[in-house]
Amino acid sequence: MPNASHASETQLLVELVAKIKSLNGAVAEEFGSLELKCPCGKVILPPTPHIPSLKDRQRGLLKSRIREHLRSQHGILEQTVRTAIREAFAQK
């Protein structure tokens, strides 16, 4: 049976991946801005205008902010972070 810290880490990642997937969907297109808060309540990306010509750069910025937050604030291992980011940004 996994210990409590693994269960809470898993829950955090599942919730964050779901938020990122919804952000990658219609939200940026419809509302014209990107913003992301971690389930822990910390802001990962403050409201940022969505600029279609910079889509790839903005996606890279978001990934690096997520990576930094998960590693520094939650102590999640790099391999786990990579897997979560890959899942969050996977195309349907």
Image: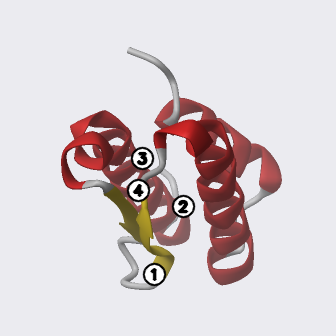
Query: Residue 19: horizontal and vertical position, in percent?
Result: 32, 52
Query: Which SS class for mark 4?
Result: helix
Mark 3 or 2, nearer chain start: 2
Mark 1 or 4, nearer chain start: 4
Query: Residue 68: horizontal and vertical position, in percent?
Result: 72, 69
The kind of residue tagged 2 is His
> Looking at the rendering, which quadrant does residue 16 occupy?
bottom left
Query: Which SS class for mark 2?
Result: helix
Q: Residues within 10 Å of mark 4 (few under 14, many from 20)?
A: many
Between marks 1 and 4, how big is the CA–CA gap?
12 Å
Q: Can residue 84 be seen at all in this image of the molecule?
A: no
Left or right placement of residue 89 versus residue 61 in this view: left
> Looking at the rendering, which quadrant does residue 54 occupy?
top right
Between marks 3 and 2, how big is the CA–CA gap?
16 Å
Between marks 4 and 2, how big is the CA–CA gap?
15 Å
Between marks 3 and 1, how big is the CA–CA gap?
15 Å
Where does label 1 land, which residue? Answer: 43
- Mark seen at residue 16: 4
Q: Residue at x 78, y 44 (%)?
A: 79
The kind of residue tagged 1 is Val
**3 and 1 marks in contact (CB < 8 Å):** no
> Looking at the rendering, which quadrant does residue 55 occupy?
top right
Where does label 3 land, which residue? Answer: 17
| Closer to the camera in the image, 11 or 15 | 15
Q: Which is closer to the viewer, label 3 or label 2?
A: 3
The kind of residue tagged 4 is Leu
Left or right placement of residue 60 versus residue 24 in this view: right
Q: Is residue 76 above or below residue 91?
A: below
Query: Residue 36: horizontal and vertical position, in percent?
Result: 40, 66
